[in-house]
Amino acid sequence: MSRPRRRNPAAALIAVAPLASRWIERLLASHDPPLTPAQFLALRAISAEPLAAAELARRAGVSGPAVSQLVAALEGAGWVEREPEPGDRRRQTLRLTQPGREVFSSATRLLHARIGNLLAGLPPHEADRLAHLLEHVEAALGGSPPPRRPPPPPRKRP
């Protein structure tokens, strides 16, 4: 009797993640107002609990310089506000405003509806198992920043 072939979870994630990302990116772009994936991840993280920018960078998978631009865009849109942390005037906590909660909620409903339709054919026990396993993947990926981008290749001189 032959053993069942063991599946490679990294290969499966590598295959599906870019496809899921493309769907999510396009759905968020069609949302009113349009959102980037980074904006959505930031709103999602802040909706769970007020955060400092450094913690937001880790949870949204963006660099320190990128998080300041991200927070400025969210604040400019009126979706996030900064509050000084008690006891440390230099640190600020980010909170969702009411419009930010509404935008996040609306975008989440859009994603759940459209991605949910794609997954509707899964048997319920497999859908539950997939959700459980993806929670572990999210914890692993959200627990550390992504690798740095490589430097651009040297420019060729004519």
Image (cartoon, grey):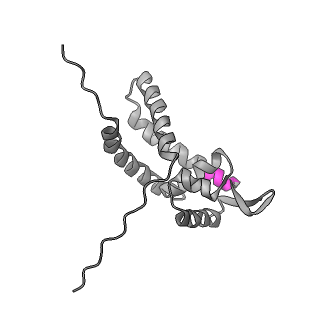
Prevailing secondary structure class for the magenta stretch in the rendered image? helix
Q: Nearer the viewer, residue 19 or 62?
A: 62
Q: Position of residue 73 (x, y in %)?
A: 58, 66
Q: Position of residue 110 (x, y in %)?
A: 50, 45
Q: Nearer the viewer, residue 81 or 124?
A: 81
Outermost residue toward the left in this view: 1
Is 139 above or below relative to 84? above
Q: Nearer the viewer, residue 112 or 10?
A: 10
- Location of the N terminus by quadrant is top left
Q: Can residue 95 be spotted in the picture?
A: yes
Quick check: is 156 in the magenta stretch? no
Quick check: is 101 in the magenta stretch? yes
Asked whether, in this view, residue 74 is left or right of residue 27, the answer is right
> Which stretch did the figure color magenta?
98-104
At 61% from the left and 57% from the top, the residue drawn is 54
Quadrant housing residue 148 = bottom left
Quadrant housing residue 76 = bottom right
At 81% from the left and 57% from the top, the residue drawn is 87
At 64% from the left and 58% from the top, the residue drawn is 79
Q: Position of residue 30 (x, y in %)?
A: 46, 55
Quadrant housing residue 90 = bottom right
Asked whether, in this view, residue 14 is left or right of residue 59, the answer is left
Q: Position of residue 103 (x, y in %)?
A: 60, 53
Outermost residue toward the bottom in this view: 158
Q: Can residue 41 be spotted in the picture?
A: no
Is 76 above or below relative to 122? below
- Location of the C terminus by quadrant is bottom left
